[in-house]
Image (cartoon, rainbow, N blue to C red):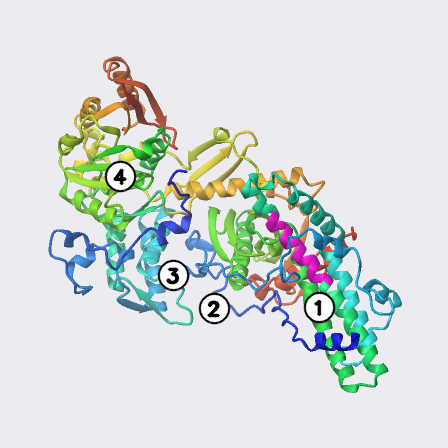
Amino acid sequence: MLLRLPFTLSSALLSPPLHPHRSKPFSSLSSSPNPNPNPNHSSNTTLPLFLRPLSYSAPVSSLLSFRLWAESLALSSVDDPHLLRELSWLIDDASAHKHPRNDSLVPLRAELHELYELWRERIEKRRPFQYLVGCEHWRDLVLGVREGVLIPRPETEMVVDLVGEVEGFERGWWADLGTGSGALAIGIGRMLREDGRVFATDLSSDAVEVARFNVERYGLKDKVEIRQGSWFEPLQDVKGKLAGIVSNPPYIPTSHLPGLQPEVGLHEPRLALDGGENGMDHLLHLCEGSASALKSGGFFAFETNGDAHSEFLADLMTAKWGKFFHNIKIVLDFAGIKRFVTGYCR
Amino acid sequence: MVFSLLLKRSKTPKPLPLPLPLPLPTRNPNPLRASPRSTATSPLGLSIAYGAGALSGTWRPSRCGEASRSSIAPLLGLRSFSSPATTAAIAEPPRTCDGLTVDAIVGKGWTILDEGESDWRSHAAAIAQSVQVIKKRLQWGRMIDKSMQLSAILNKSDLWDDPDYAGRISREHGEIMGKIKGVNQFEQELVEHIDLLKLAREENDNELEAESMRALLEMRRKAKEKELEAILSGDNDSCSCFIEVQAGAGGTESMDWAAMVMNMYMMWAQRRGFAVTVVEEMPGEIAGIKRATIKVHGEYAFGYAKAEVGVHRLVRISPFDSGKRRHTSFAAVAVIPILGNVSTKYQIKESDLRIERFRAGGAGGQHVNTTESAVRIVHIPTGISATCQNERSQHQNKASAMAVLQSRLDQLEIARQAQMNAEHTQSLSEISWGNQIRSYVLHPYRMVKDLRTNYEVSDPDSVLDGDIDGLILSFLSASLDKNEDRA
């Protein structure tokens, strides 16, 4: 029996071992914990919206006028039906889950004027929705995110499935390089047995802080270890012992950065996107390093910029580095793009 | 001796009848309605409004919390029995001292008077008649056969090699035996009360006679409730279900109508305490929906909703017609059970699936940040597909779409076994637009009429607000009682 449980939809929101009242705001990990839950305290605003206390309330009618205002703002700028869905989710996250029956006051996790500001930022500054609410739903997880940390992408979800297909993965030591919010590390960590571990590295201290927060929230401190540093640098002690390496490294060619959609280009960290002149800088480094970091028979899965990049990488690893790797495969994402390169260390 | 025994028994307090399966619908606390132009969205997305005009696409399912277990347990059975020995007892129908059985009582043709009349023959006849109706609705003969089959399986020595299967069989057997036992007990009670009453008359015991009369009256009322409960005794009635609505030809007007129909079901489900989630939706360009699927989660959701399968017709002055002309539009409704019973589940092979990102385009990956993560899954051998776009992660959209696909394939499987199973409901593609089941007229007069039962409601607004239990029940009882009794 594997320890993999089929998580139901509701369990993502309700039942992971969450201790929202115990989890600290991101910043409190570096500063001293603040016992005073004063909602105006700046640290509290860095908590994902859905984890903040229900310190406020507003009449149903005010919330309704906010909704109508927000809808018209959304429709006046871009014709995007997803914005309306995002608006519903914003309100979901900002209010209590339970229906306030016969109650004209709705308990809220942020002041109403804050919601107005957030939505204005969404529409006018194209601030990503996930930064607005401080979280991203990814697989069956709800991960905290904030500025300075890449918002995990739906494509990347599949990497966890790729790992789940590797024989004996659940007892091995894994590395997630450039973990960002910790998405892959947590996704894998939840499938591991007692002796399995994930070492997740990131250069960015923002990412390290957020990843630690998420790891703690899912109760995985014993399984997932976050280490700060560039790629393999913090992993010298486990060199040659890894059962697998996964990574979603920056892979966008530098010249493409100015043309990115505003949500990405203006708001997400360049460190997590810029893949150098042709986008391959980090991927090549990872492939090279994997040869010595993986143990014999170890698995790797890397996300790439797609199609040509995956083909290039797969060719390289089959031909030039064929003495280190074998069984190299290209895996499509759900959009049919050749997104991932996987293989094994000889 | 007999006397004291009977007396003792009659004084034992009877278990109170369980509440009616149909709690009166409480008025919807939300005053927002979905008449054609009233698009309003509650701030919490609690009520649903299908938009005419600019706000289309804003509708969200109600978050009515966990599906409360409704009060409709399969009531006839109070306790489940798994001993095959009990089957033998069924063969012998209970008799009074002078040999009357339930069937014999009906055969006497005693006049059934008002409940107020203290005439034991009238009560007895009414109860006996109810017992026959209940048995018919339960498909008594089929049920007995099934219990025997299950007993035979349970007696196999290697049954528990597959504990999962064994557990299911044993549960199913327990449920059926419970129902059978429940009806038998009821019959037994009837003949005992009759005996007791006759005895009281012989002994000139007025008090006992009055008490037996009261007991019979009580049984008579209980019998009426049991008749209703027996309506929901189909194989999959207790399952949750998907409800799908598709707009007919006729553009915006009929898409708006489809949205109104879907809204009606969402509000109905909310009243009943079912949890509703929107799985898939294709909004119309101007208003309404081309097609949508919701999941209705709760006990007996399918049992009720299956009455809605077919084409719903609307007649009104179209708000989308500047000429203010009268329009007739159609919406097709399909209902798919979400099977709990694994034995009928269609086995899906992973290799038969093609999973696509809906509206794929662009470079994807780090290039794009979108909260749109809709997934479509195609089952290649059958061409059946399912889409989900309403969850917040692609992973969960995939899981939801997979659940819909599973149910659609299950439905195919059920259809394939239709010869054995008369409970087959049609999928949207099978429903012919000629198969109209209900007509909603808003102009020139106002009325909702079920074309199958001729049941009428003169207030279309209440129906469109989800007050459809009357329509559903009249259809369910009519269709069950019409069925040839296979007993």
Which residue is at 24% across, 37% downward? A198
Mark 1–mark 3 distance (CA, rounded to whole Å): 41 Å
Q: Name the kind of residue labelled 4 in the image.
A: Ala
Magenta stretch: residue B7 in it?
Answer: no
Q: Marks 3 and 4, how far apart in space?
A: 34 Å
Q: Which residues are magenta?
A: B170-184
Callouts 1 and 2 in the same chain: yes
> Which residue in the structure is indicated by mark 4?
A185
Mark 1 lies on residue? B224
Q: CA distance from mark 2 to mark 4?
A: 47 Å
Q: Secondary structure at mark 1?
A: helix
Percent of width and height locating residue B340:
56, 47
Going by the image, does A82 lie left or right of B98?
left
- Indicate the amino acid at tag 1: Lys
Tag shown at residue B44: 3
- Residue B31 is marked as 2
The answer to whether tags 2 and 4 share a subunit is no
